[in-house]
Image (tube, coloured by chain):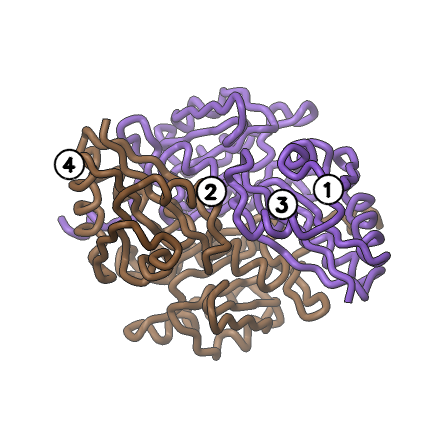
Chain colours: A brown, B purple
Amino acid sequence: MAKLTVVGLGPGGAKDMTLRAVEALEGCDLIVGYTAYIELVADQFPDKETLTTPMRKEVDRCRMALERAQQGRSVAMVCSGDPGIYGMAGLLFELAEDEFSDVEIDVVPGVSASNGGAAVLGAPLMHDWCTISLSDLLTPWEKIEARLEAAAQADFCISLYNPSSHKRADYLSRACDILLRHRDPATVCGYVRNIGREGQEAHVTDLATLRDTAVDMFTCVFIGNAQTKVVDGHMVTPRGYLQRED
Amino acid sequence: MAKLTVVGLGPGGAKDMTLRAVEALEGCDLIVGYTAYIELVADQFPDKETLTTPMRKEVDRCRMALERAQQGRSVAMVCSGDPGIYGMAGLLFELAEDEFSDVEIDVVPGVSASNGGAAVLGAPLMHDWCTISLSDLLTPWEKIEARLEAAAQADFCISLYNPSSHKRADYLSRACDILLRHRDPATVCGYVRNIGREGQEAHVTDLATLRDTAVDMFTCVFIGNAQTKVVDGHMVTPRGYLQRED
């Protein structure tokens, strides 16, 4: 049966890949992906044929990869982070069912931006947490608002993806306003830009300040829960081990 | 300055480690961890000294690792999955601040059980999702209930950690009962046991059936959102690319 492997590259540089991801790329003969991700792997696998498409052409890119697999090529599609977290895994399964039922999809998970960014900041996601994308390209804003509201009320730690874009410059402020209805303005927050890449930048701040902070689309934002604290410059959410000892 | 590296091993076998994790273990001279995790790495790094402690001795284990680092040893502490997701990263930062302020903590993130289990099932976490532990050892059950309720209402995909133990045999049923107040009994669910290890087992089911399913503590459980569907035997949550095309 024809097979397509979708491979998570991890959040940053080549060292964030798993051994299974390296093996999958070594074993394929064609690597497909968004231009920026292909550039990340081209140096590491110089003898592989590559096929790139620009951003926002997700459906075309996945169809192209499935077609090549159907033709008998050994195809690996690369995604940054984890292909199963805001990546291409789901779309590939859907397209395969509809149009390429003879292609089997294999998912190689990766370290996602939430996990990678959290490690840079310290340990902000040590307790129950959720991930919300602020992009309303595919999701109605009302649904995003309802999720922010629910996450704030139930005191989840939160990682925010796509916190900004040219068209959505004020979305992070709007999200913080919703969170501030239920959470202390002093809630510890953080954000990491270019996780694991050149120019990586990490900042620890509070929710009130975050509301008025400009971040770009290469940034992952973290909101603490009511227990999150600053520990020696790091953002840390206690799991409760020491508190149990008291 | 003395340094301690806390390393995520990923969810399963040796191939789920990142290159950075391998490098960290190669570079250290003492590996500390819970007995089961030490067994996982002992074969791969046979020349390293190891120090193990049984489960539930988290605070002792972290203090031991910090003491060795303070004494000048090059210490790596290993966790399964990601040390920043229900792992030891947060506790190490807290202890370092209180008792070992001369030890610097470095976190090497890993593929968490959520990401690894999702890849086995298909692509269940492709939209906004949250992670909730059903263990009430460190968290009051009322707080866990409030988070389940909020997640169900706002239609998050959910990954559940620690869905069962000897003392908490009915916790998954209780959690499903809360979810069923807001979600369709036909909601697609899945669970994976022994992710990436020998005896790996994956099942796709629905919320009503999951309520009456017995799972053990080595299982990660996934609840879909209202759009999650079964695609050729896989659990897949659409992100919305094809729906946008319609």
Q: Amino acid at mark 3?
A: Tyr
Q: Is residue B65 above or below residue A97?
A: below
For label 2, the crowd category at 10 Å Cα-Cα, with few meaning under 14, some 14 to 19 and many 20 or more, is many
- Dot 1 alpha-carbon crowd within 10 angstroms: few under 14, some 14 to 19, many 20 or more: some
Foreground mark, 1 or 4, reads 1
| Amino acid at the residue labelled 4 | Gln
Identify the disc placed on residue B115.
Answer: 2
Dot 2: chain letter: B
**Foreground of the two, A116 or B17:** B17
In the foreground, B184 or B6: B6
Say which element carries label 4. Answer: loop
Q: Which mark is residue B86?
A: 3
Name the residue tied to disc 1. B48
* x 46%, y 64%: residue: A220
| First reached walking from the N terminus: tag 1 or tag 2 | 1
Residues at marks 2 and 3 touching, judged by CB atoms closer than 8 Å: no
Q: In what element is the residue under mark 2?
A: helix
Task: Work out how far the residue at label 2 is from the one at label 4, CA to CA, in angstroms.
Answer: 30 Å
**Separation (CA) of disc 4 from disc 3:** 43 Å
CA gap between label 2 and label 3 equals: 14 Å
Mark 3 belongs to which subunit?
Answer: B
Q: Chain of mark 4?
A: A
Q: Earlier in the sequence, mark 2 or mark 3?
A: 3
Q: Residues within 10 Å of mark 4 (few under 14, many from 20)?
A: few
Residue type beneath disc 2:
Asn
Depth check, front residue: A30 or A92: A30
Q: Amino acid at mark 1?
A: Lys
Secondary structure category for the residue under label 3: loop
Q: Secondary structure at mark 1?
A: loop
